[in-house]
Image (tube, grey):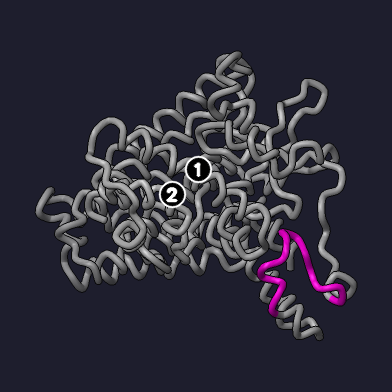
Amino acid sequence: METYANALLYAIPFFIVLVLFEIAYGYFVKNQTHNAMDTISSLSSGLTNIVKDSLGLVVIIMSYPYFLEHLALFKIEATWLVYIVAFICIDFASYWNHRLSHKINFFWNQHVIHHSSEEFNLACALRQSISNLLGYFPILLIPAALFGVPHEVIALLAPIHLFAQFWYHTKHIGKLGVLEYIIVTPSQHRVHHAINEEYIDKNLAAIFCVWDRIFGTFQEELDDVPPVYGVLKPASTWNPVLINFQHIWRLTKDAWRTKYWFDKFRIWFMPTGWRPKDMAEKFPIDIITNPYSLKKYDTKPSPFLVGWSIYQLMATTLLMLFMFYNYANIGFNNLLLYGLIIFLGIYAYTSTMDRMKLAWIIGLIFSCLGLFILYKEGNWFGLNAYTAFGNYVIALYFISTIIGVLYIAFNDEQYRNSILLKT
């Protein structure tokens, strides 16, 4: 995990620079594909995902080395050939994992966050799951194990394969000619993120679009069918933690409430969107039937709230980068605490973005917890070893957060009006 954390030290700034470049490009060509609050939510979702993954918070059913030891038919040396075989096997496994996530109720919960944005841009690529707590992906890598691909090669290529899926989340690149028959392109992935009837559950491949063409899930982007983005049951929140567990919460409620015992069991493994008949009748859920009538989620934030949210995102990103930089010295128990603080901070400011009634209280709890740790330890997880002013900077951040949430809660007119409307 330390190696992964070190890789993220370089990957995260690179992704952020590309997102900022896309925002600037959209501004100059007068075709902006970013909404401030949506982009902040997307980037915040990315932060939760990489913190969770860097801490290794997942239960592995069976590990890849186990399959390699017991199933390998060949032994391939670590040459250029093994890297090609490994990458193809990872991509093949990714296709079926993706298809499983789109087709089965339980697995959709770990993927819905990625589709939850009603925009399509590089930032939404970073909407990744924190609810994928069951590690079954090695099972899908059995073909690689049969070929005898060393687990070190899989470990090296897996993050590269994931990062290579970032670039095609954009509206600014059109169709790419002959490449449309070889790799996944922005045009193909725009189709994948769309909720139009013609497009839904299509183009599931990650890198090589050949899998979609072979297994019948390919759909070209049509000139007369502009993609509409999001999910059929809109998230209606900027809070990535809530989005991650909305679907599983709905499944849990249906499983608890239904009078049919068989339905309590099978709901988890039925096709995505399936509900027990009595639940669909008693507790109907609004689903988008006409994508072109979709009204995007908009909390109409004040300029101050937008600025404050950007400030929180930037501060949280810096806190997380320090966590990765000092990963080996912090220690596992403190890493868990550090991760909890980051999660709580993101939950607090994205709830404020939603204008949740008690969001300011969550913000106060987050800030007071941070100040308490700073006071008790006298050192922010080893920051003093790098700068003599570290504690003052951290204290200033938490104090400014307290001032900010109190100002928003009691002086931001739009925020107070929205709370009154929700009450």
The answer to which image quadrant residue 376 occupies is bottom left
Q: Which mark is residue 92?
A: 1
SS under mark 1? helix
Q: Quadrant of residue 76?
A: top left
Residue that appears at 43% across and 47% down: 313
In the image, residue 152 above or below residue 10: below
The magenta-colored residue range is: 265-278
Amino acid, disc 1? Phe
Q: Determine which quarter of the picture holds residue 273.
A: bottom right
In the rendered image, which quarter contains the C terminus? Answer: bottom right
Q: Which mark is residue 345?
A: none
Res. 172 in view: no
Question: Residue 323 in the image: x percent, y percent?
Answer: 26, 54
**Residue 341 location, x and y as percent?**
36, 64
Looking at this rendering, what residue extends furthest in the right direction? 281
Q: Is residue 62 above or below residue 122?
A: below
Please say whether residue 369 is visible from this viewpoint.
Answer: yes
The reply to whether the magenta stretch includes residue 6 is: no
Q: CA distance from mark 1 to mark 2?
A: 9 Å
Please tell me which residue lies in front, 410 or 246.
246
